[in-house]
Image (cartoon, grey):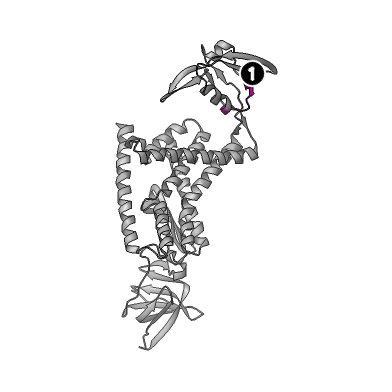
Amino acid sequence: METAIAFIIIFGSIVFFHELGHFIFAKRAGIMVREFAIGFGPKIFGMTKGETLYTIRLLPLGGYVRMAGEDLDSVELQPGYRVGIRINNDNEIDQIVLNQNKQFADMLFLEVEKSDLMKEMFIEGYNEEERLVRYKIARNAVIIENGKETFIAPYDRQFGSKTVGQRSLAIFAGPLFNFILAFFIFLLLGLLQGVPTNEPVITTVMENSPAAQAGLKDGDLVTGINGSPITTWDELSEKVKVSPNESMNFTVDRNGEVLEFSMTPNAVESGEEKVGQIGVQYMSPLEKNPVQAVVFGAQQTYEWTVRIFTLLGTLITGNFSIDDLSGPVGIYKATEEVAQYGVFNLMHWAAILSINLGIMNLLPLPALDGGRLLFFLFEALRGKPIDKQKEGMVHFVGIMLLMVLMVVVTWNDIQRFFF
């Protein structure tokens, strides 16, 4: 149960921030957002605020922000269609009722002759006295069909009416917010747990190792190697690594006393090369410093981004197998393992997952944010949009392929963890 709660909180938060990025930049561009959804499938909770429906759906495997004009959400009133309308104090239509089966208060009825619900915003038709009348539609008008209300989206509030730059920002903001979330999680870790100082302090000396034989002890602070000053553990590690079977002189500060030690690192095979090891373990001291926490947040976000892109490089070279990929089941099992080591490790895991989601969505694949951004790039280069039907077909095929991949990866996860 605890694992399930942790998984829902972590994955839900990551998805929420991703969709929040889309939502904020869509609203900034003046795009009407019809729905802000966490999850897919049947709705288990919904609340309408303003012109947006906020929902939580059954399958916690993602989310979406549905913007006006992105799908076939426009209504066309064909000539001869009978509708009910309500007129406001500005003599504009603020309600259009379709498929009405009862008389609403203050409702007039028109047999539509012609209309435009997006650009010119009007309805022209014959009233009950068979006179041809024309009414302007209010920008905040709603359409009511079978009891369901939907806001009319004027063309300038639709996704397709915006510039390539505005649409690109609305799409790119989703992955961007995943990186921002990761940064703030790492920042919070730095504030609560502390930032590793990277001091070259030896935490543990292994038995029968070159360091133990030379006389190094737990807690020794290495200040120099072969006469060169050492200020970080990374410097110490790198000098030892490139010196297998070479004698080295260490200068150590032990409780204020300066000592000298000589040792020869063992040569240990690492891939196709041999590296030096002296047999010590390291756990960096932690320091709570707000400024360092900000730097730590940025460094960790950058470093993990580079690592994940490096791993993605194996997809191009072909040096990967299906076992290297994980779906929701694999992420759930990993969360279960990480949860055993406390809340700080869960936070670290959440930050890594957030970066993963941001990078994966930026891949130039159909149906992903990166695929949509690629179409916007083509549009900017050719000076006109790609045919909507062709683009829609590409994204549809992409969705189908992603669903197949998800099923394969999930089934592989199930076999790996449960059989």
Question: Can you say which quadrant of the picture contains the N terminus?
Answer: top left
The image shows residue 28 at horizontal and vertical percentages of: 53, 61
Q: Is residue 100 left or right of residue 235?
A: left
User: For this rendering, which residue is in front, 387 or 13?
Assistant: 387
* 71 is higher (above) or lower (below) than 60: below
Q: Amino acid at mark 1?
A: Thr
Q: Is residue 229 magenta?
A: yes
Q: Is residue 80 left or right of residue 185?
A: left
Residue at 51%, 46% in the rendered image: 179
Where residue 323 sits, quadrant-wise, is top left
- Which residue is identified by label 1? 251
Question: Can you say which quadrant of the picture contains the C terminus?
Answer: top left
The image shows residue 102 at horizontal and vertical percentages of: 35, 75
* 239 is higher (above) or lower (below) than 375: above
* 248 is higher (above) or lower (below) than 15: above
Residue at 42%, 61% in the rendered image: 381
Where residue 213 sits, quadrant-wise, is top right
Question: The magenta stretch spans which residues?
Answer: 219-234
Residue at 32%, 37% in the rendered image: 322
Residue at 30%, 39% in the rendered image: 411
For residue 375, say whether it is visible: yes
Furthest residue in direction right, as rendered = 256
For residue 17, say whether it is visible: no
Q: Secondary structure at mark 1?
A: strand
The image shows residue 174 at horizontal and vertical percentages of: 47, 52
The image shows residue 403 at horizontal and vertical percentages of: 31, 48
